[in-house]
Image: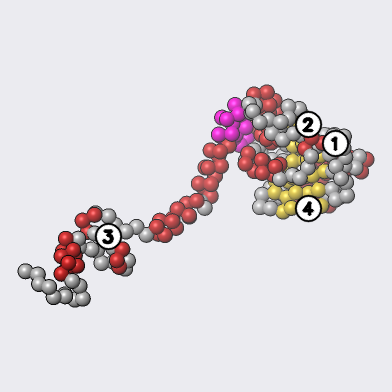
Amino acid sequence: MLNSRRITGRTNEDFVRQLKHPKVQTDAGPEAIPRHSGRRRVDVRRLSRPLARLRRSPILRALVGEARCWLFDCRHGVRTCGTVDLNKLTIKGDNARHGVFYHPSHPKFLFEIMGALDIDYERYAFVDLGSGKGRALLVASEFPFREVRGVEFARELHEMACDNIQRYRSASQKSKNVRSIHGDAIDFEFPTLPLVLFLANPFGPGVLVPVLRRLQASLASHPRDTIILYAAPFHSDLLERETRLTCVERSVYHNTYRAPHYPATPY
């Protein structure tokens, strides 16, 4: 029988309670879990480390990115996904060797860079050189640009862009003045409106240099605010060499260039 003496500093009641509910001896001390519960202590920190590594996995990030692109197409009833090699396409002009394969920019990226522009959109034209299937044009139409234009030298991509422009469904679309132009960017005449020019590394220096020179000539004859959003800026040095635009932002995925002395012209 249990008597009333203390056993190792505990009362009889404590001892009886220990017999009924034995505890697992762990570093947690008084927070130890009863054996009969069948539960084990889980180190959340150990689980968080592999999960963090998984979130940083480039493969997983690529899969998530592709899924979001596919959802953009499904939501709006268009087809802008997929990578296409130029050697499978019908090219207008003689500059196919300077072109880059089609791979559309991510919708989230496009919304972010356009939404960050501190401009009166209704005064500006948006132009995408190498517009492919028209995804950047569709995102640009979600902002109230005065006009949205894309230039694409691959006939099949241009036709898909025209179809996507017609099929695009969005209750929040703000600009209906959207058009894809089948032609070579080297021959494109820039609108004389204040301009937002999007370049997603569409071509190499053989086309980029004459395009930039034509842009600079247009700015010299019609001074106006001009912003270039240059994604994957592999030839960024050419922009500052061939134009008077200066880099006002450098980020992981794009650079932003702007004419330093020309305020937006109220058209």
Kindly report the distance in space between the C-alpha atoms of the residues bearing marks 4 and 3: 61 Å
Q: Which residue is mark 4?
A: 247
Q: Please, what is the three-letter code of the amino acid marked with disc 3?
A: Ile
Q: Nearer the viewer, residue 239 or 167?
A: 167
Task: Indicate the secondary structure of the residue bearing disc 2.
Answer: strand
Q: Residue furthest right?
A: 221
Q: Which label's residue is closer to the chain start, 3 or 1?
A: 3
Residue 82 magenta-highlighted = yes
Amino acid bearing label 1? Leu
Residue drawn at the location 70% of the way across and 49% of the way down: 254
Q: Closer to the N terminus: mark 4 or mark 3?
A: 3
User: Position of 252 compared to 50: left or right?
Assistant: right
Q: Position of residue 64 (x, y in %)?
A: 53, 42
What residue is pinned by disc 2? 147
Disc on the earlier residue, 4 or 1: 1
Q: Quadrant of the N terminus?
A: bottom left
